[in-house]
Image (cartoon, coloured by chain):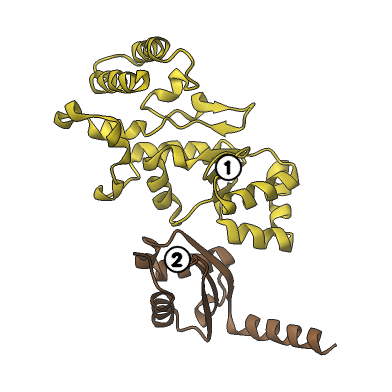
């Protein structure tokens, strides 16, 4: 219940956000979170609709926290926003011509370029929610290289946008040094052939 | 819902003209998961990533319904021949 209230409040802030300065928005969101869900694991910064790769990265965890469907709130702003409810997050995004907004593309560019190895996956590296994602995590773990993961199940718009960004229809998606490397099959194949090790060693040294 | 093995086969056959094609329905009946072995001349001179992109492209319509597509093999006829021969010599030995 508290979360529902928070969502409504957050949307309110997002809709009126254009007039607010960013700092004010952050403050307001922090306040909103403190009020509505003191024990929430969400981060105020992460709840901002504007993605910022530097702010949402927590190197200690090696995991990006994309705000849950926050961009969708932006899309639903306008006259329809009065009807916003928790059901909005389940709306199919296929009705939009493109999920890959310029804003999302910029963010993804930053994410894949500011980290040597990025895995877009279902679940997290500690709790993969798909066998294929798990396979790639295990392979990367075996090399003992640092990598960040992005849980695409947390953000439907991100999930759809990434498919376009990578021109790849499924997950997981592995990026090495800003380049799309492949999905699960390609990673397994490259792991067996030694090509992946070579590439990762090169990436780590550069 | 879902896609049938035959649909996947016919799309791949018409678009990639494969000399060898094996489609295995790994979904357990719902038609959302397939494993593929494909040999086509169109893969000549292409990296594995590009080969997968070609297959994904050929199945663009089907992919909307497919949850997982595992491309076990995407080989050129030449590579396929070599692989067959090396497997044969192994079993002979």
Give the residue displayed 28% in from the left and 23% down from the top.
Answer: A11
Check the residue under mark 2 and report the chain it is in: B
**Quarter location, residue A115:** top right
Residue hosting label 1: A118
Taking the image as shown, residue B71 lies to the left or right of residue A193, namely left
Taking the image as shown, residue A20 lies to the left or right of residue A115, namely left
**Quarter location, residue A107:** top left
Q: Colour of chain A?
A: yellow
Q: Position of residue A192 (x, y in %)?
A: 72, 62
In what element is the residue under mark 1? strand
**Tag of residue B56:** 2
Q: Position of residue B34 (x, y in %)?
A: 50, 68
Give the residue displayed 36% in from the left and 18% down from the top.
Answer: A2
Check the residue under mark 1 and report the chain it is in: A
Report how far apart the C-alphas of labels 1 and 2 lie in the structure.
22 Å
State the residue lying farthest toward the left: A79
State the residue lying farthest toward the bottom: B92
Q: Is residue A187 above or below residue A203?
A: below
Which chain shows up in brown? B
Q: Position of residue A153 (x, y in %)?
A: 46, 41
Taking the image as shown, residue A64 lies to the left or right of residue A194, namely left
* Mark 1 neighbour density, 10 Å: few (under 14) some (14–19) many (20 or more): many
User: Are discs 1 and 2 located on one and the same chain?
Assistant: no
Depth check, front residue: A125 or B48: A125
Q: Is residue A128 above or below residue B34?
A: above
> Can you say which quadrant of the picture contains the N terminus of chain A?
top left
State the residue lying farthest toward the right: B93
Q: Position of residue B89 (x, y in %)?
A: 79, 87
């Amino acid at each position: 219940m508290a979360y529902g209230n928070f969502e409504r409040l957050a949307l309110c802030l997002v809709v009126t956000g254009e007039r607010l300065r960013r700092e004010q928005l952050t403050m307001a969101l922090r306040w909103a979170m403190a009020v509505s869900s003191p024990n929430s694991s969400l981060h105020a910064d992460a709840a901002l609709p504007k993605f910022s790769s530097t702010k949402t990265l927590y190197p200690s965890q090696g995991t990006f926290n994309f705000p849950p469907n926050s961009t969708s709130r932006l899309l639903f702003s306008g006259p329809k926003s009065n009807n916003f409810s928790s059901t909005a997050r389940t709306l199919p995004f296929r009705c939009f011509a493109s999920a890959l907004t310029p804003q999302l593309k910029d963010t993804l560019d930053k994410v894949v370029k500011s980290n040597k190895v990025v895995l877009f996956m279902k679940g997290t590296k500690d709790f993969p929610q798909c066998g294929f994602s798990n396979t790639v995590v295990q392979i990367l773990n075996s090399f003992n290289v640092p990598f960040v993961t992005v849980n695409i199940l947390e953000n439907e718009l991100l999930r759809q946008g990434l498919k376009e960004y990578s021109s790849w229809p499924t997950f997981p998606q592995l990026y090495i040094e800003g380049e799309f490397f492949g999905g699960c099959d390609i990673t397994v194949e490259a792991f067996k052939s030694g090509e992946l090790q070579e590439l990762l060693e090169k990436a780590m040294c550069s | 819902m879902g896609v049938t093995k035959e649909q996947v086969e016919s799309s791949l056959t018409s678009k990639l003209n494969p000399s060898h094609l094996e489609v295995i329905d790994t979904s357990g009946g719902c038609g959302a998961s397939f494993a593929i072995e494909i040999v086509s001349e169109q893969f000549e001179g292409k990296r594995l990533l590009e080969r997968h992109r070609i297959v994904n492209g050929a199945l663009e319509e089907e992919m909307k319904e497919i949850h997982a597509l595992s491309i076990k093999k995407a080989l050129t006829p030449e590579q396929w021949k070599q692989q067959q021969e090396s497997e044969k010599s192994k079993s002979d030995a």
